[in-house]
Amino acid sequence: MNVNNETFRSDWRGTIALVCGTMLLGGCAATGLSTAVGPSRKAIVNEASAANIEGLQLIPLNSGVVEALRVSDLPAESFAQTIGSATPIGTVVGVGDVVEVTIWEAPPALLFGGGMISTKIGQDIGTSRPGTIPETLVGPSGTITVPFAGQVPAAGRSLSSIEQSIVSRLRGKANQPQVIVRIVRNATANVSVLGEVSNSGRIPLTPKGERLLDILAAAGGTRQPADRITLQLSRGNVTATMPLAEVIRNPAQNIILQRDDVLTAIYQPFTLTVLGAAGKNEEIRFEGTGLTLAQALGRIGGLQDMRADPRGVFIFRYETAEQMRALGRTVPPTLTRVPVVYQVDLKDPQTYFAAQKFAMKNSDVIYISNSPAADFQRFVNILASSVLPGVSVVNSVR
């Protein structure tokens, strides 16, 4: 049977086109390439309106919102209020300290040394020389051993109290004894310094009363610029954090430390996450002195010109119920932390003033949606890349 060649080619071209179209539509549906990779601006707004998430608030960002948040925001932690300044350690001795005891006697010295000075006029004068007991460790029993005085309690006592005890024990044995006790090595009154400092370790305190910046200087200072360091101070079960720059700027926060305090210098302790049509998607670290929205957008390289929707910049975070009420928002009584989405319209020039004052918080998420035109262009590009090979086959058959 003879078959017309033109009819055969026409049928074959139709079959190829049908197969290519079926593969294209099926591939797009199966892989999801015909849709955006993240929610659009419209989808986020609709979700907030649908109230599928309890208490979810969508708030357009403007100068009024920024000012209300600033006023209602919880006060920052401060060392002076949260930790409190300690009193200098004074001269209290602890187990493990090493002390030195020096004893004088009035002439004629009977136990701890003395001598005579010739006057060359007939009668010598008696003198007294100090008798120093070798350095003595305050042992687990909390006592030190003093010749002719025995075991003298020392742990938990001041130097003057120890001196009086030794004098009372030597009366009747030594001639008008006088005693001086000093701490040679301090093993108990120390502060631990960790983190971004030149020399981590334990630094001893003195009766002078070392302040926070004194201890930081004794550790060799910080390895990073001061305006990017946050200090964390722990005393017992209480912990507070403050930017180092604020401690330097405000002398009231440069508190006196006490034994067993732990001071940690942390470099850029806070983070936020950037997703969507931004210059780069990643976790951004920032310092304790704070970061504004304008600065955050600058650090991520801004928006992608060919993808981003300038009206579709969103900040996702949890705010306190008190802050939402300060904005005039109704909050369910069961919620103490409210999910909030701040919408930023970068087409509005006034937004850029608000962005300079809007403070980013730890764990914030910045999401930049694709513009509708970018989603359509993406679909067209995928369509073109899938159809052109089929067209080439049809042309080759032709």
Image (spheres, rainbow, N blue to C red):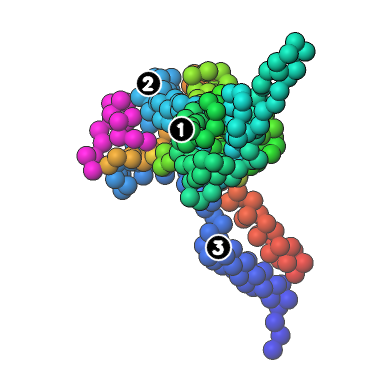
Magenta residue check for 218: no
Residue 265 placement (x, y as % from top left): 59, 36
In the image as oriented, which residue stretches furthest toward the bottom? 1
Dot label at residue 252: none
- Decide if residue 283 is on the left or right side of residue 319: right
Examine the image and state in which quarter residue 51 appears.
top left
Determine the CA span between mark 3 and mark 1.
93 Å
Q: Can residue 75 be seen at all in this image of the molecule?
A: yes
Residue matched to label 3: 31
Dot placed on the residue nearer the N-terminal end, 3 or 2: 3
Dot placed on the residue nearer the N-terminal end, 3 or 1: 3
Q: Nearer the viewer, residue 18 or 233?
A: 233
- Decide if residue 4 is on the left or right side of residue 170: right
- Decide if residue 318 is on the left or right side of residue 313: left
Q: Quadrant of the C terminus?
A: bottom right
Q: Secondary structure at mark 3?
A: helix
Q: Which residues are magenta?
A: 319-334
Mark 3 and 2 residues: CB-CB less than 8 Å, in contact? no
